Amino acid sequence: MVTRSCTQQQFLLRPDPETNNAFIYCLAVAAERHGVTVLDFIQMSNHLHGVVHDRYGNLPEFTRDFHSLLAKCINCIRRRSQNVFTTDQVSVVVLEDSKAIVDKLCYVATNAVKDHLVETCAKWPGACGHRALVEGRTLRATRPKHFFDSDGEMPATVSLTPTIPNELGDPQEILSEVVRRVEQFEREAARERAASGRKVLGRYAVLRQSWRDSPTSRLPRRGLRPTFAGRLWARIEAAQRKRAFVRSYCLARAAFLAGAPIPFPAGTYWMHRYVGAPVEPNENSN
């Protein structure tokens, strides 16, 4: 699961036709370019979430291209400059089992409902992949006119089909559970509003917000940033694998600096991609 927030929590991604189109376009281009499968995503006004499957180990380049292309488009649309996204490190959480996948797909789908911005997922006016995932639809976008050259190499149109890969489990079982839990969440949110007298902000109010604004509520202080999600033992095993990776990486780095290189552990990215250092074969082909 990949999460990125806008600088100063501004509503720079506030839904409108041009921003929605640019979001899907840049996401589709980056996914196609780097072989990443998109399961689901949502474009909130001041942050984004995405659940993706990175079978080829290209997530760093995928996030770089997606976020940088989108930021350039947004700056042109808003007629502004400087950062669109916060300079904090991109949040990447590895989903270790099917429970974590279902949990995060539900979280992404219900993000706008959770904050009582709209009553149901379908009413959110920003770009989102939940309905396309459920209905098996393909999303399409055209090349944003604000940033890209009409005679350049970028495609005039792109398509994106949110999909649950077979490597992650039975797609129909996962999808059925996601649909059930999303509908349950929407009913519980409606009951909560009825009990408290709270109303949703609504699509019209969301669309009328200024992109220069930010939420009036203050964010809680940052705690630990999770790296893994899943059942307890899945997280423990993932943490053990990470510790083993760090130990092997440190040994390989020391050998590399000493002029007697040995293979870096599988999963090493920068040293392999940009320096050409040898890397052990990855036993997990998924």
Image: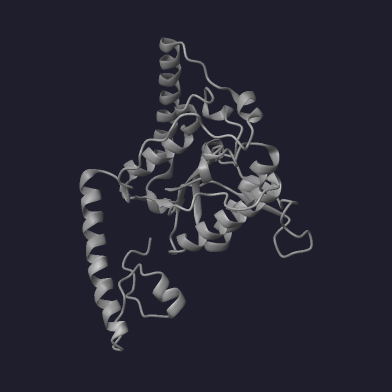
Q: How is the image coloured?
A: one colour
Query: Splitting the image into 4 quarters, where does residue 136 fall?
Result: top right
Residue 249 versus residue 172 in the image, above or below: below
Q: Residue at x 57, y 30 (%)?
A: 124
Position of residue 68 in the picture relative to residue 260 (left or right): right
Q: Residue at x 64, y 41 (%)?
A: 20
The residue most toward the right is 151
Residue 197 visible in the picture: yes
Count the labels in the image: 0
Q: Residue at x 59, y 34 (%)?
A: 213
The residue most toward the bottom is 259
Residue 210 versus residue 235 in the image, above or below: above
Position of residue 61 in the picture relative to residue 259 (left or right): right
Q: Where does the image place residue 215, in percent across and percent down from the top left?
A: 51, 32
Q: Where does the image place residue 180, in percent across and percent down from the top left?
A: 41, 29
Q: Residue at x 50, y 57 (%)?
A: 63
Q: Where does the image place residue 113, in percent across and percent down from the top left?
A: 48, 27
Residue 243 versus residue 17 in the image, above or below: below
Position of residue 171 in the picture relative to residue 209 (left or right): left
Residue 6 visible in the picture: no
Q: Quadrant of the image for the C terminus?
A: bottom left
Nearer to me, 200 or 6: 6
Q: Where does the image place residue 97, in percent across and percent down from the top left?
A: 31, 47
Query: Splitting the image into 4 quarters, where does residue 151 fall?
Result: bottom right
